[in-house]
Amino acid sequence: MKLNLSVDEVLSTTRAVRKRLDFEKPVEPEVIKECLEAALQSPTGSNSQGWQWLVVTDKDQREALANLYKQGWEMYTQMEGNVETAYKGDDSERISQQNRVHGSAAYLAENFEKVPVMMIPILPGRYEGLPSMASAAMLGSILPGAWSFMLAARERGLGTAWTTIHLMFEEQAAEIIGLDFESFTQCALITCGYSIGTDFKPAKRPPVETVLHWDQWGGKAPW
């Protein structure tokens, strides 16, 4: 089933779905295949097309990965006050939004093993210590495909969330999924399942003028 959303609707309403995941409804393999076919149309650095995609639906493997995730989540929450990407302003509405995000993330961590599908995007090689250009090229070869997968999932009534906490234990995760850790890098773990309801709306974001610089840092937009 497709929702027949416009491109702009898909782009502006693809949320990180955690609390509204349907843990009881299985996801048909053919639906995952359709989403991956969209992902394979994404651009990659030098057209390398080096990505690989590992789908985890086996109950024992999901539980094992969930165990790693929960260990990582506990570590993450203990250091969260020092996470530079967390909002530290005094906008009460933004603080409330951040609290809701934290609550939904905690909910996902508590129920991680119940997620019907875990999608792990993979690239060949190891990328530790790369110069910034190489790191950017690596990320640019996997993020477009992963996002395309998530957009295609949204159009088919699925909810997804990009997670990386299991990478605290990437080598152990590689053992669980039978991956050669020395030869491949796991780039994320995308949780996936049918969403409870499909009426997602655009999130509140700061006006574009507050984050835009035109021609040079601090340059004003021409509109």
Image (cartoon, rainbow, N blue to C red):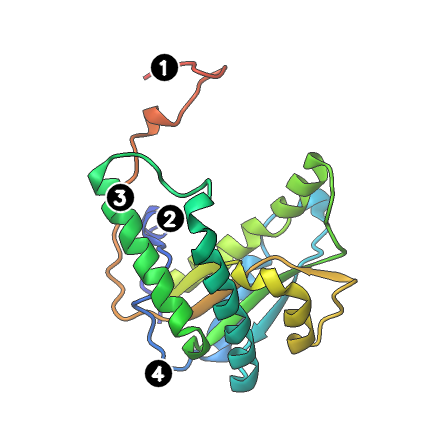
Task: State the CA–CA distance, disc 3 to disc 1.
Answer: 31 Å
**88 sits left or right of 133 in the view:** left
Pointer 1: what residue? 222
Residue 4 in view here: no
Residue 171 against residue 128 in the figure, above or below: below
The nearer-to-camera label among 2 and 3 is 3
Task: State the CA–CA distance, disc 3 to disc 4.
Answer: 32 Å
Seen at 58% across and 65% down, the residue is 120
Whether the residues at callouts 3 and 1 have beta carbons within 8 Å, the answer is no
Pointer 4: what residue? 24
Task: State the CA–CA distance, disc 2 to disc 4.
Answer: 27 Å
The nearer-to-camera label among 1 and 4 is 4
**Residue 61 x %, y %:** 57, 81
**140 sits left or right of 9 in the view:** right
Task: State the CA–CA distance, disc 2 to disc 3.
Answer: 24 Å
Residue 167 image-quadrant placement? bottom right
Mark 1: secondary structure: loop
Pointer 3: what residue? 95
Seen at 46% across and 64% down, the residue is 74
Pointer 2: what residue? 11
